[in-house]
Amino acid sequence: MVRSTGSTHPAQFIEATHLISDLRVPFGQAHSTGVQWSRLKDSLPAPAGYIQDLLAQWNQAGQIEQEMAALATAQANVASGWSKLAAFALMAQSGFDILHAWTQATVFQLWQLRIAGEFLHGSRSAGNATLLKLLKDEFEHHLQFDQTARSAARNAGLVYDALIEYMDSE
């Protein structure tokens, strides 16, 4: 259990985690990362060109603007959640493992939001490709907390491989 002293309150922690995790943004959810690309829980890798095709569909349907608006809201929420989490962590007396896990989760969210913005603006760069590969490696390591190394590698691949393939394809 996370416990605090002083001016922080556990409700601040709950609010922070809600702001950080309640995201409905492109390239941060199952379907738009390539996980459950078939809309089934089959854990099959997305086909080549999946992200490029998805962006083309969104462009044709005029959905890019909606996704950009969702992204802007998510960026504001995560920034607010990060601030609340940091303030709470400074006063916490216990639960450091939980706070550390939420800090890691927030960093993943921030980077996913950056990548989403790049994709929605049609930007591809070597720097972003490198970032995605680093995120995949870090996520795989993070998953090994409660998964076998093989499962962690597979699951990290399901989240990041289609994104990496899109970034590397130009």
Image (cartoon, helix red, strand yellow):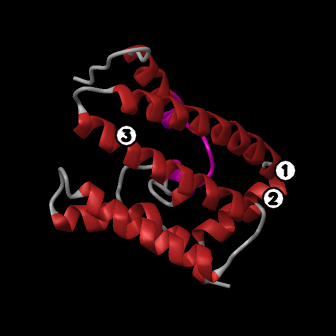
Q: Is residue 33 magenta?
A: no
Up the image or down, 63 lies above or below 84; here it is below
Residue 91 in the image: state x and y as whole percent. Answer: 36, 26
Q: Which SS class for mark 1?
A: loop
Up the image or down, 60 lies above or below 125; here it is above
Mark yes or no: residue 147 visible: yes
- At 67% from the left and 70% from the top, the residue drawn is 52
The foreground one among 129 and 154 is: 129
Q: Which SS class for mark 3?
A: helix
Cα gap from disc 3 to disc 1, whole angstroms? 34 Å
Cα gap from disc 2 to disc 1, whole angstroms? 5 Å
Amino acid type shown at disc 1: Gly
Q: Which quadrant is home to the C terminus?
A: bottom right
Q: Earlier in the sequence, mark 3 or mark 1?
A: 1
Q: What's drawn in magenta, residue-wise? A: 19-32
- At 58% from the left and 68% from the top, the residue drawn is 50
- At 44% from the left and 30% from the top, the residue drawn is 17
Q: Which mark is residue 103?
A: none
Q: Which mark is residue 62?
A: 1
Q: Nearer the viewer, mark 3 or mark 1?
A: 3
Q: Which residue is mark 3?
A: 102
Q: Which mark is residue 59?
A: 2
- At 57% from the left and 38% from the top, the residue drawn is 78
Amino acid type shown at disc 2: Asn
Farthest residue toward the front?
A: 6
Q: Residues within 10 Å of mark 2 (few under 14, many from 20)?
A: few
Q: Which SS class for mark 2?
A: helix
Cα gap from disc 2 to disc 3, whole angstroms? 34 Å
Q: Earlier in the sequence, mark 2 or mark 3?
A: 2
Please state if 145 lies on the left or on the right of 33 as rendered.
left
